Image (tube, rainbow, N blue to C red):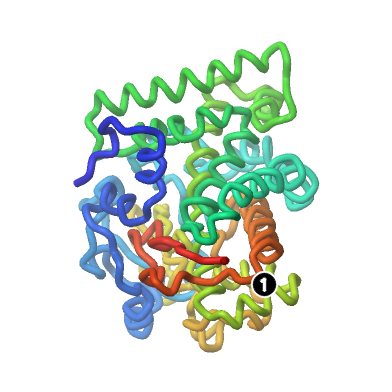
Amino acid sequence: MQEITKPMNEQSQFEDLFDVEKEAKRRHGAALTDDIYPRLAELRRQTPVMRGSLHELFGHGVPAELFIKERPHYVTLNFAAADRALNENDLFSSRIWDEHFGIRAVGRTILNMVGEEHRHVRGAVQTMFTMLHANRWWKPKWIEGIVEELVSAFEKDGRTDLNQTLCAKLPMLTITRALGLDDSDAVSFRHDLVVSVMFTTPADERAKAAAAVRATLLKAMDVRRDAPREDILSGLMRAEIADEDGRRRKLTDDEVLNYCRILMIAGGGTTWRQLGITLMALLSEPENWERIKADRSLIEPAIRESLRWNCTDPLFFRLVERDTELCGVQLPAGAILEVCLGAANRDPSRWENPDRFDLDRPRQRHLGFAGGPHTCLGMFVAQAEMQVALNVLADRFPRLRLDPHATPPTMAGGLDARGVTHMQVRFD
């Protein structure tokens, strides 16, 4: 298994962090490069909820930090089962993340909270991630300028790997700057953050990386105690939540630190992969890209369809809190329920020709951003990043196309984090 902690320069660190196959090998020992959807369809035809771990059913490397042999595993395979599992969070609980090594290493966050605690803590920052705020604050203050910088850096080259030069850098720089950190910290901070939550990394190296992450964040917090800024970190330090007795209080330093860690992990990772997936869908069928260039109103449905067709995180986990029944299958208390968003989003009972990427597909709710109380906090920011990026590419590169001399991009990764292998394009 490849070690992420070996000494390397910043460019090597960056390339190592934003490689879907290396990411999967670190977590599972191997990357899954086959199309996962034919197998999911085969399993769905048998039952809406199946006994067993999806990793075992696929014969893929099991994520040891969540595969608990003492607990039975079940996996949802249609939309109805996944949708109910995500919405009934008191029954299908996100407390399962208490047993996940990486989430435990980050600290207690909204990911592993339920009920009133989750509502209060998430509500403390929800206003910073609304659609209105994404369009009126994130876009003009951060996203538009970053896209301009990144595109200007390669526009005279005639070719580039958009997966590295745009898809990966855009969300990493957006969340870094919006949080309040310097660009010079972006790669090293993310590298240390990943090392600190990777259960395959030696304990002493994890501890060293965690200490570096904490020191960087505390230094930034100290600056803002006397001089708050217009950024996420200052907003977190101002935020208040209600305690169990109803009294209002500010977030503690540790709560702010935990929020920062989870925002950096999610904000710099999922949008990178989803933007690459969207570009693959559009450029692999040139007619799709021609339509986007001619009609920018198609960008929003293109992003929505890419999230349905190939969501970057097709598998989530929940803990069954009480004996219950799901789509006719009995689940015992204490079981781990693997909620397969990928299978749900291609349920043929909900979508016609679900394996096809269709720009004209009628609008219908999907689970690409999960659902229920734990719907992705940053979904509107992610959509804003992708919208700006696609618009600028269409404006600046009328001849944008996949590089005919490169191997076509394909999907790879694990069952819970997938993206494109590359996005080699030409625009000369």
> Looking at the rendering, which quadrant does residue 188 occupy?
top left
Residue 187 vs residue 149: left or right?
A: left
What secondary structure is marked by label 1? Answer: helix
Q: Which residue is mark 1?
A: 301
Question: Disc 1 marks which amino acid?
Answer: Pro
Depth check: 14 or 320 in front? 14
Q: Is residue 361 left or right of residue 370?
A: right
Asked if 370 appears above or below 226 in the picture, the reply is below
Extreme residue toward the top, this view? 226
Residue 224 at what x, y percent from top left?
Answer: 67, 17
Identify the residue at image location x=46%, y=49%.
94
| 265 with respect to 244 (left or right) | left
Q: At 38% from the left edge and 37% from the top edge, which residue is drawn?
A: 194
Which quarter of the image is occupied by the C terminus? Answer: bottom right
- Is residue 49 visible in the rendered structure shown here? yes
Task: Name the spot of residue 327 as percent of width and height, x first.
Answer: 44, 75
Left or right placement of residue 287 versus residue 193 in this view: right
Task: Give 116 or 147, whichever is nearer the viewer.
Answer: 147
Q: Is residue 83 visible?
A: no
Name which residue lies at 65% across and 29% down: 236
Question: Where's residue 319, x and y in %?
Answer: 40, 53
| Label 1 Cα neighbours within 10 Å, binned few <14 / some 14-19 / many ≥20 | some
Q: Is residue 320 above or below residue 346?
A: above
Give percent across and percent down for residue 317. Answer: 40, 55
Q: Which residue is painted at 69% across and 41% down in the image?
A: 142
Q: Nearer the viewer, residue 8 or 405?
A: 405
Across the whole image, how many numbered discs are drawn on residues?
A: 1
